[in-house]
C-alpha cells in the first residue's frame, strides 16, 4: 500500500513540468518583446518630440525711432525693417547681400509681427530702445537644440559657419535664451515650423469627436438595446448581426468615400468641416458601439430581467429600469474606446477634405478644420527638419489623449460596475 | 351442578372514523388553476405532453421529477414566462379562476402581477432593500403616497419574515444580504404586488439547510393567503412543504395526488421508482 | 418492480440485511414455539430450560433489527414501498419478540406442570395449537419475504381456528377445575399456556396485517373473523335446590 504511494517526481511528471516551464517562458518572452517595441516606439517619439517644450528666442535691442511710426496707423510701420536694422546694428561687419539675408534669417519671418504686437500692446515704448526676445528661425532652433552636427561639411548643413559664428557671439552675450514653447499649444498650423501649433487641430478634433459622440452614442445604444432586448431572434436578426459585425470591419477609408459622395456631394454639407468629419466617424463608430453595448447588455444576467418581468414590469420598464442602467458602464466604456479609435482616425477625414491647411482655430462645427492625426500626417510630410520634432510632439499629445480616454473608460467601469 | 355459559354482550355498532377529509381535501374545493391538455414545444422538440392538472387554492402543490421532465416548463406556463422564449409554443388551455390565460385578450403584465414567481437563484435587483420591494407597487401604482409605499414595503417584508432583520438598513443594497435573506427579499418583492398565486422554481436549491428551513416555514405560513406551486428537486422538501404533489416524467404528468399518498403509496410504478431512488 | 435495484447499492444491502434478520428471527421463534410445546407434552424440564435461554437470542436480534431500521430511516429516508417495508419490519420484529416471550412463558410454566400430575389431554391440544401457530408464523414470514398478499390474507383467516381451539380448551379446563379443586394449579397454568398460544396467533395475524400494509399501502379494512369467546364465558353457580 505505502510502496506505490510516491510523491517524488517521476521521469514522466518531470517532462510535464518542463514543458509547463517552457510554455511560461514563451509567454514571458512574448510579453517582453511586446513591451520592448512599445518602449522603443514611445521612447523614440518622446526623444524626438520632447524638444518642443522649449523654443529658442534671440534677444535684440531695437530702437523704436518715433519717426518710423505714424501714430494713426501703427500697423503700417515697417516692423520687419526695424528688426533687420537691429540685427545689422548687432553685427555691423556684415555687408554682403547674401550674408545679410542669412543674418535676417536668424529670426523667424514672424519676428516683425512679434515686435508689432509688443508695440501695439504698449505704444509708449515708441521713441525708446527696447529689449525684445524674438523667435529664432527653425534651423537655428534645431541647431541650438544640438540636432545639427557641426562637424558635417558646410555644404551638407542647413546652418552655415557664418551663422554658427553669429550664434556663438550671441550666446557669449547671453542673448540666446530657451523659453517655454507656448506657441505650439496656442497657435494653428503654419508653414514655418517655429510658428506652427496644434491648437486648431485640437479644437477641430474636439468638434469632430463631439459630433461623432452625439450621433453615434444614442444611435448605437438604442440600436443595441432594440436588437438585444426586443427584436425577435430569427433569420433577419441574424442577418443584421452579421452585417453589423462586417460593418465594424470595413476599412475606414470606405466610410470616408461614403461621406464624400453622400454628405458632401449629395447633401452639400460644408467641406472640411467637423460636422461632416464627425458624421463620417460616427458611421464608423456606430458598429463598434453597437457591438460593445450588446455585449454589455448580454452580460446583465437574465435573472434580473426575469425578476422584473415576473412582478409585472413591461419589457420597456424592465429594460430601462434595470437592464440598461446595469449595462451603461459597459456601453460607455465601449463608446469611449470607439471614440478613441475615432480620435486616431485619419483616412476618412482626408477623404472629406479635413486635410486642409488650417491656420485659424475653428469656432464652430461648420468651419473648415483639421484634426490632430491629420495634422500629424501633414507635418510628417513637410520637408523642414524642425517639423520632425513637432510631428513627434503632436503624436505625444494624441497618445496622451488616447491614454486619458482609455483611463477614463477603465475608471468608469470600476466606479459603476455592479456585482450581481 | 354449575353450568358454564357464554354471555355475548350487545356491542353497539361503532362507525370507523371518517378518514376522507384528510386523505384528499382537494377534490372537494374548486380548483384555482386548471390546466387542460397543455402541450409545450421548443421548436420541434415537445417538452410537455397533454398535461392536465388541477391546483387547489390556498394549498402548496409540489412539482417533482427528474431533470428535464418539464416541471419548470409547466411552472413557467402559469405566468407565461415562456413567452420570452421565441421558439416556445404552448397549446391547450390553462385557466385561472375560470379565465384562460392564453386567450388573445389576456394582458401578460396584469397576469404576472397576480401570478408572482420566485426563482432558483435569489435575484434581487442591485438596488437597496427598500427599492427592491417598492419597485413592484410603484410600477403598478399601488401606493398613492410615499407613506403608503413605505407601509406596503414594510408589510411585505414582515410577511416574508425579513423585516426584523433588515428594518435598520433598508437602504443597504439587496445583494449585501445572505443567500437565504436574499431569497426572502425576493419573496417579499413578489408579495408586494399582491399576487394570488406564487410560483417557486427550486427556491432553496442555492441555500443551506437552516435558510431552507426558514423558507419552508415561510411557505407554510404564506399558504393561508396565497396559492403556491413549487418546483423542487428535493423530494424531502416536497414532502415537507406541500399538500399535493405532482410527479412529472419525460414531459408527462405521471401522477398527482395528496403528498402523503404519493410518498407512502404511489400508484404508478414510475413514481415509485423515482421517489424510492431506483433506476427507472 | 422488485428486481429493480436502488441507485444507492448500500440501501439495497441494508434492506436485504433487514429481511434476513427477520427471517433468522422468525426461524428462531418457530423453533421456540415447537420446543416449548414439545417440552410441555414430554414434561421435559431440560428442553424448557433451553427454550428460556433461547429467548435471549431473540431479544438480541430484535435490538439489532431495531437499530438497523432506525439507521435506515435516518440515513436513507425511505419512501413509498421502501418506507412501508422498513415500518413493517420494525413492527414485525416486535411481534416476533412477543411471540418469543410467550414461548418462554410456556417453558417456565412447563417446569411447574412437570411437578404435578397430568390433567386430561390438554397438553396435546396445546401442542396442536402450537403447531398451527408455528405454521402461521412460518407462512406469514414467507409472505413477508415474497410480498405475497394472498398468503398473508390466508394466515389472517386461519387465526379463527386457533381461537376456537382456545375456546374449547378454556371450557375443558374450567370443567376440570370445577370437578376437583386439586386440578386448579395445573389447570390455571394450562389456561395461561393456552392463552399464550392464542396470543401468539394474534401476533402472527398482526404480522399478516403488516405484510398487507407493506404490499398494498393500506391496512386490511375488513373486520378480522374473531373466534375467541373466552372473555364472555362464566360459570353459572347452580341453585341450591336439593
Image (cartoon, coloured by chain):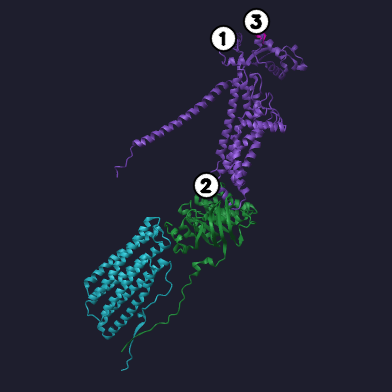
Chain colours: A purple, B green, C cyan
Give the farthest residue toward the front. Answer: B44
Q: Residue at x 48, y 72 (%)?
A: B18
Dot 2: chain letter = B
Dot 3: chain letter = A
| Closer to the camera in the image, B233 or A12 | A12
Give the label, 3 or 1, closer to the camera: 1
**Disc ID at residue B121:** none
Distance, label 3 to label 1, CA atoms, is 25 Å
Instruction: Look at the picture and state if A167 lies above or below A22.
Output: above
Q: Mark 2 — residue?
A: B176
In what element is the residue under mark 1? loop
Q: Is C198 one of the magenta-colored residues?
A: no
Asked whether residue A305 is in view, the answer is yes
Quadrant including the C terminus of chain C: bottom left
**Disc ID at residue A153:** 1
Q: Is residue B137 left or right of residue B119?
A: right
Instruction: Look at the picture and state if A25 lies above or below C22.
Output: above
The percent coordinates of residue A318 (x first, y second) are 60, 48
Labels 2 and 1 within one chain: no
In what element is the residue under mark 2? helix
**Disc ID at residue A93:** 3
Labels 3 and 1 within one chain: yes
Occupied quadrant, residue A128:
top right
The magenta stretch spans which residues? A87-99
The percent coordinates of residue A1 (x first, y second) are 29, 45
Amino acid at each position: 500500500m505505502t510502496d506505490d504511494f510516491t510523491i517524488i517526481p517521476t521521469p514522466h511528471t518531470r517532462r510535464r513540468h518542463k514543458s509547463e516551464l517552457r510554455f511560461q517562458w514563451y509567454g514571458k518572452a512574448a510579453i517582453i518583446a511586446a513591451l520592448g517595441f512599445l518602449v522603443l516606439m514611445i521612447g523614440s517619439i518622446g526623444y524626438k518630440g520632447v524638444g518642443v517644450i522649449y523654443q529658442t528666442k534671440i534677444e535684440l535691442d531695437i530702437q523704436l525711432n518715433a519717426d518710423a511710426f505714424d501714430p494713426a496707423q501703427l500697423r503700417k510701420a515697417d516692423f520687419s525693417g526695424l528688426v533687420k536694422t537691429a540685427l545689422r546694428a548687432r553685427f555691423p561687419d556684415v555687408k554682403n547681400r547674401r550674408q545679410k539675408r542669412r543674418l535676417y534669417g536668424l529670426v523667424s519671418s514672424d519676428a516683425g509681427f512679434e515686435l508689432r504686437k509688443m508695440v501695439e500692446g504698449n505704444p509708449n515704448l515708441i521713441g525708446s530702445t527696447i529689449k525684445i526676445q524674438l523667435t529664432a528661425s527653425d534651423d537655428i532652433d534645431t541647431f541650438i537644440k544640438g540636432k545639427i552636427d557641426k562637424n558635417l561639411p558646410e555644404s551638407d548643413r542647413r546652418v552655415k559657419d557664418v551663422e554658427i559664428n553669429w550664434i556663438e557671439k550671441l550666446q557669449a552675450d547671453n542673448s540666446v535664451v530657451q523659453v517655454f514653447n507656448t506657441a505650439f499649444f496656442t497657435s494653428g498650423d503654419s508653414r514655418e515650423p517655429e510658428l506652427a501649433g496644434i491648437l486648431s487641430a485640437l479644437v477641430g478634433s474636439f468638434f469632430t469627436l463631439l459630433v461623432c459622440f452625439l450621433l453615434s452614442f444614442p444611435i448605437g445604444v438604442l440600436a443595441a438595446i432594440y436588437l438585444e432586448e426586443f427584436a425577435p431572434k430569427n433569420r433577419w436578426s441574424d442577418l443584421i448581426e452579421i452585417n453589423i459585425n462586417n460593418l465594424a470591419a470595413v476599412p475606414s477609408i470606405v466610410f470616408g468615400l461614403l461621406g464624400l459622395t453622400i454628405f458632401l456631394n449629395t447633401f452639400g454639407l460644408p467641406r472640411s468641416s467637423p460636422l461632416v468629419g464627425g458624421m463620417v466617424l460616427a458611421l464608423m463608430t456606430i458598429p463598434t458601439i453597437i457591438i460593445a453595448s450588446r455585449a454589455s447588455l448580454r452580460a446583465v444576467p437574465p435573472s434580473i430581467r426575469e425578476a422584473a418581468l415576473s412582478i409585472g414590469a413591461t419589457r420597456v420598464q424592465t429594460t430601462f429600469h434595470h437592464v440598461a442602467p446595469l449595462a451603461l458602464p459597459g456601453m460607455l466604456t465601449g463608446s469611449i474606446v470607439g471614440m478613441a479609435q475615432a480620435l486616431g482616425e485619419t483616412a476618412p477625414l482626408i477623404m472629406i477634405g479635413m486635410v486642409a491647411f488650417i491656420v485659424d482655430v475653428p469656432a464652430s462645427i461648420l468651419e473648415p478644420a483639421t484634426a490632430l492625426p491629420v495634422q500629424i500626417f501633414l507635418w510628417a510630410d513637410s520637408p523642414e527638419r524642425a517639423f520632425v520634432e513637432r510631428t513627434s510632439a503632436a503624436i505625444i499629445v494624441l497618445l496622451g489623449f488616447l491614454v486619458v480616454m482609455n483611463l477614463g473608460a477603465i475608471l468608469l467601469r470600476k466606479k459603476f460596475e455592479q456585482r450581481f | 351442578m354449575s353450568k358454564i355459559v357464554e354471555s355475548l354482550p350487545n356491542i353497539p355498532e361503532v362507525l370507523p372514523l371518517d378518514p376522507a377529509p384528510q386523505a384528499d381535501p382537494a377534490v372537494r374545493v374548486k380548483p384555482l388553476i386548471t390546466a387542460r391538455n397543455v402541450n409545450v414545444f421548443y421548436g420541434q422538440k415537445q417538452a410537455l405532453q397533454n398535461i392536465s392538472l388541477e391546483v387547489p387554492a390556498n394549498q402548496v402543490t409540489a412539482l417533482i421529477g427528474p431533470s428535464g421532465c418539464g416541471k419548470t416548463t409547466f411552472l413557467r406556463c402559469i405566468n407565461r414566462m415562456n413567452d420570452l422564449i421565441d421558439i416556445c409554443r404552448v397549446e391547450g388551455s390553462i385557466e385561472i379562476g375560470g379565465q384562460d390565460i392564453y386567450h388573445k385578450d389576456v394582458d401578460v403584465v396584469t397576469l404576472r402581477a397576480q401570478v408572482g414567481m420566485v426563482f432558483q437563484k435569489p435575484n434581487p435587483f442591485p438596488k437597496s432593500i427598500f427599492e427592491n420591494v417598492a419597485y413592484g407597487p410603484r410600477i403598478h401604482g399601488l401606493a398613492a403616497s410615499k407613506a403608503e409605499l413605505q407601509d406596503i414595503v414594510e408589510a411585505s417584508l414582515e410577511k416574508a419574515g425579513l423585516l426584523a432583520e433588515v428594518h435598520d438598513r433598508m437602504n443597504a443594497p439587496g445583494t449585501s444580504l445572505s443567500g437565504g435573506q436574499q431569497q426572502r427579499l425576493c419573496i417579499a418583492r413578489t408579495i408586494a404586488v399582491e399576487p394570488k398565486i406564487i410560483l417557486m422554481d427550486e427556491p432553496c436549491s442555492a441555500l443551506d439547510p437552516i435558510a431552507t428551513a426558514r423558507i419552508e416555514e415561510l411557505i407554510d405560513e404564506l399558504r393561508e393567503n396565497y396559492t403556491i406551486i413549487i418546483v423542487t428537486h428535493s423530494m424531502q422538501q416536497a414532502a415537507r412543504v406541500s399538500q399535493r404533489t405532482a410527479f412529472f416524467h419525460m414531459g408527462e404528468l405521471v401522477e398527482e395526488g395528496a403528498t402523503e399518498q404519493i410518498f407512502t403509496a404511489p400508484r404508478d410504478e414510475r413514481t415509485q421508482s423515482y421517489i424510492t431512488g431506483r433506476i427507472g | 418492480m422488485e428486481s429493480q435495484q436502488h441507485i444507492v447499492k448500500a440501501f439495497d444491502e441494508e434492506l436485504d440485511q433487514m429481511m434476513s434478520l427477520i427471517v433468522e428471527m422468525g426461524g428462531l421463534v418457530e423453533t421456540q414455539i415447537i420446543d416449548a410445546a414439545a417440552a410441555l407434552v414430554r414434561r421435559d424440564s431440560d428442553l424448557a430450560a433451553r427454550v428460556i435461554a433461547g429467548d435471549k437470542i431473540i431479544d438480541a436480534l430484535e435490538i439489532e433489527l431495531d437499530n438497523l431500521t432506525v439507521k435506515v430511516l435516518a440515513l436513507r429516508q425511505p419512501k413509498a414501498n421502501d418506507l412501508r417495508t422498513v415500518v413493517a419490519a420494525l413492527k414485525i420484529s416486535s411481534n416476533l419478540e412477543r411471540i418469543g416471550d410467550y414461548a418462554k412463558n410456556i417453558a417456565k410454566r412447563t417446569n411447574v406442570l412437570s411437578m404435578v400430575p397430568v390433567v386430561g389431554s390438554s397438553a396435546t391440544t396445546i401442542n396442536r395449537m402450537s403447531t398451527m401457530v408455528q405454521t402461521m408464523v412460518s407462512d406469514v414470514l414467507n409472505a413477508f419475504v415474497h410480498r405475497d398478499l394472498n398468503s398473508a390474507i390466508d394466515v389472517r383467516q386461519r387465526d379463527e381456528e386457533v381461537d376456537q381451539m382456545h375456546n374449547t380448551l378454556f371450557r375443558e379446563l374450567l370443567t376440570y377445575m370445577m370437578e376437583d379443586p386439586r386440578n386448579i394449579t395445573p389447570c390455571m397454568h394450562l389456561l395461561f399456556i393456552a392463552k399464550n398460544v392464542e396470543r401468539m396467533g394474534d401476533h402472527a395475524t398482526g404480522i399478516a396485517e403488516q405484510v398487507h400494509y407493506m404490499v398494498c399501502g393500506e391496512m386490511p379494512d375488513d373486520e378480522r373473523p374473531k373466534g375467541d369467546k373466552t372473555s364472555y364465558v362464566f360459570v353459572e353457580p347452580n341453585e341450591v335446590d336439593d
